[in-house]
Amino acid sequence: MKPMPQIAFLECSRCNHHVSADTPQTLCPLCAGSLYVRYDMDALKRTARREDPAARASASNTSLGMWRYAAVLPDVAPVTLGEGWTPMLQSKRYPGLHIKEEGANPTGTFKARGLGLAVTMAKHYGLEHLAVPSAGNAASALAAYAAAAGIAAHIFMPQDVPFANYLEGIVYGADVNMIDGLISDCARIVGERIKQQKDSSTPINEVWFDISTLKEPFRVEGKKTMGYELVEQLGWTYPDAVFYPTGGGVGLIGMWKAFEEMEALGWVSGKRPKMYALQAAGCEPIVKAFEQHKPTSEFFPNADTFAAGLRVPKPYGDYIILDILAQSGGKAIASDDATILQSILDYARNEGLFLSPEGAAATAAYDQLLKSGELKPTDKVVLFNTGAGLKYTDMTAEAMHLRRPNEKKPTLPTSLPVGGIITPQ
């Protein structure tokens, strides 16, 4: 594995205040902005090297997953389950479309990247209790990596998340709490619990650490590896556009940070891709803010969509997401649930890909822009399917009004005849 860099400092994304990374940090102490991890880029430029394109397919080279980018990740011992280096699939119908299949990650989603690195750092800092509000998949990933690290995970999810997310939390031994509400309600409860602990006599090692989206600096570091990967898998070149399903938006933010770092290191040049943030019409705070030319979003009332990962009424990093869209010349687009479902079926039957509802929000938007002529089939586009469709079997089946044939509890015969081809009559 490549040598890892020391963190120079943490920098506020809003006011640029610097904070030490020697102890665990959440938000900027001055303005509550999200913190970025910063390295000595001049030193990295002298030591960090990108892989030769001819060598990138070797098994020894790819087996490290996202930790192949150790040269631009914190200097810590990884807690890893094999996350990263996911397939880049060429579309069978559109010559310029590449689908980044994040469902190949541990726990079946891109969340493994961010939580893998966040839990790695938690173990490095000696934290013993981690808490997260989640729309589902972040909870699953935290439960898995916390189990691998020997850390307690406290999970708060809306009670109507995909059943797989609930099951995973239980199987991995997490403290699972199902809430009658949205992820925003879960976040409020986590914040209240931590405040109660700090105000009481709870021993410091038992106080939960909030590992919410953009409320600690290392989930972005894990997610940024998607940006390194997509550029490397395209031969160290930029695509014309990146389509990213956006709930909390950490992946989009992380990729933009990766592009900045790669340019500073001289690993990639040229015009950065247009960034597209894709949402569901039932919860589209970023789309509304983008269309109204606002720097931040407003809380989206009555959020309702079967794309559970997009059901984030107000992303904490909305100001960063909207700034990236403006800088890149991209846009935010929403599709309704019927269109998302149709895109799931279309890509399954014509591409052999079972997309997550979030990934299908991206393909639906891509198809919309093809029809309008804003995109051509030959434009080089990387589109993220952020999770395996199989994690959403209950949600997708419900959207299709699909039930198991003869859905009765099967009754087994009291005795079975034995004999035939394999055993004597």
Image (spheres, rainbow, N blue to C red):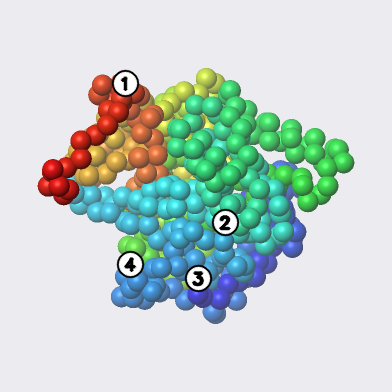
Looking at the picture, does residue 279 appear above or below residue 351?
above
* Label 4 vs 2, first from the N-terminus: 2
* In-image side of 350 versus 261 (left or right): left
Q: CA distance from mark 3 to mark 2?
A: 33 Å
SS state under label 2:
helix
> For numbered disc 4, what is the local secondary structure?
loop
Rendering quarter of residue 231: bottom left
- Which of the numbered marks, if any, corresponds to residue 408? 1
- The residue type indicated by label 3 comes to Leu
Write the residue at 51% across / 75% down.
2
| Neighbourhood count class around disc 1 (C-alpha, 10 Å): few under 14, some 14–19, many 20 upward | few
Write down the residue under mark 3: 265
Among the 4 quarters of the image, the one containing residue 59: bottom left
SS type, badge 3: helix
Within 10 angstroms of label 4, few (less than 14), some, or many (20 or more) residues? some
The nearer-to-camera label among 4 and 2 is 2
Q: CA distance from mark 3 to mark 1?
A: 61 Å
Asked whether the viewer can see residue 201, the reply is yes
Q: Which residue is mark 2?
A: 148
Circle 3 packing at 10 Å, graded few (<14), some (14-19), many (20+), is: many
**How far from the left and from the top, in percent, is residue 100?**
35, 52
Q: Amino acid at mark 2?
A: Ala
The tag earlier along the polypeptide, 4 or 1, is 4
In the image, residue 97 above or below residue 279: below
Disc 4 marks which residue? Answer: 235
Is residue 63 placed above or below 253 in the rendered structure? Answer: below
Q: Nearer the viewer, mark 3 or mark 2?
A: 2
Alpha-carbon span between mark 4 and mark 2 = 34 Å
Residue at image location 52% in from the left, 47% down from the top: 141
Q: Earlier in the sequence, mark 3 or mark 1?
A: 3
Amino acid type of the residue that numbered disc 4 sits on in the rendered structure: Gly
